[in-house]
Amino acid sequence: MPQLLTNNAADFTHTADKIKLLGYGEVNLNLGCPSGTVVAKYRGSGFLAKKEELNLFLEEIFAHATTKISIKARIGKDEPEEFYKLIEIFNQYPIEELIIHPRLQRDFYNNKPNLQVFEDALKLSKNPVCYNGDIFTVQDYNALRTKFPSVETYMLGRGLLRNPGLIGEISQGAGVEKSLLKNFHDSVYHAYQKEYYGEKNVLYKMKEIWFYLISSFADSEKYLKKIKKCERLSDYDIVVSALFSERELVKTGSPLQQTTLV
């Protein structure tokens, strides 16, 4: 699903109309990005601090909407209490789905998701709610399913970068295969080589991926150090090939419960 990051209603509407022409029936508004450069412009989770402006923005985009609109949001910028005013704003509009990452902007990805605020969101929201945040294992997922049995949809992000086979583990009880990780790596790697000019740019992007993906491999710290030191793709290829051939995957559990993953 296409996601837009903006605080300009006219820009949102214009772009959403263009996206509809491509065949999409839903557009997602990003009110969750915690990046400092984004927040400084009052976009992403930074927009949450401007509640009057946010309300006017939502009023305009829903008044001119030609597609369904979903929202991905954090619970506030600085304090958890901000959420209770935000949910009043969100409840004024027919949001297709409210995807909540129960962290503050200032948390970035530190601390723990605020599950109390998320529980309150389930009680207060007039729109369907989806959970997002810190689902890295089957056990993480099942703990949330037990705590929030009414939640029908979950969004996975960083968990899929750590383990691209996580959805299969959750939905089918199947353990991840090394070949799946290799195919995932190779697809991303080749796409970056086509998209970015220069070896350094490709290496920079791949090192970001390995920050997450390395946790799927047992006893792999020395390989990550070597990847970080790589300055040429030829050196990178040698290290990654050795990692896949020499290291086994971390074993994970696979209890199964049914839900929808997005």
Image: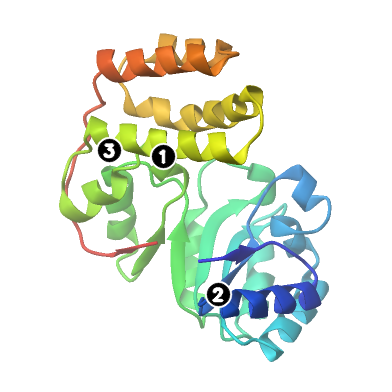
Secondary structure beneath dot 1 equals helix
Q: Is residue 121 above or below residue 161?
A: below
Left or right of 86 on screen, residue 229: left
- Residue wearing tag 1: 187
Q: Is residue 3 above or below residue 226?
A: below
In the image shown, does 178 or 69 lie closer to the viewer?
A: 178
| Comes first in the chain, label 3 or label 2 | 2
Give the amino acid at mark 3.
Leu
| Comes first in the chain, label 1 or label 2 | 2
Local packing at callout 2 (Cα closer than 10 Å; few below 14, some 14-19, many 20+) is few
Q: Residue at x 58, y 51 (%)?
A: 103
Nearer to us: label 3 or label 1: 1
Q: Residue at x 29, y 66 (%)?
A: 149
Q: Is residue 191 above or below residue 218?
A: below
Left or right of 201 on screen, residue 239: left
Residue 72 placement: quadrant: bottom right
- Residue wearing tag 2: 22
Secondary structure beneath dot 2 equals loop
Distance, label 3 to label 2, CA atoms, is: 30 Å
Give the amino acid at mark 2.
Leu
- Residue wearing tag 3: 180
Give the amino acid at mark 1.
Ser
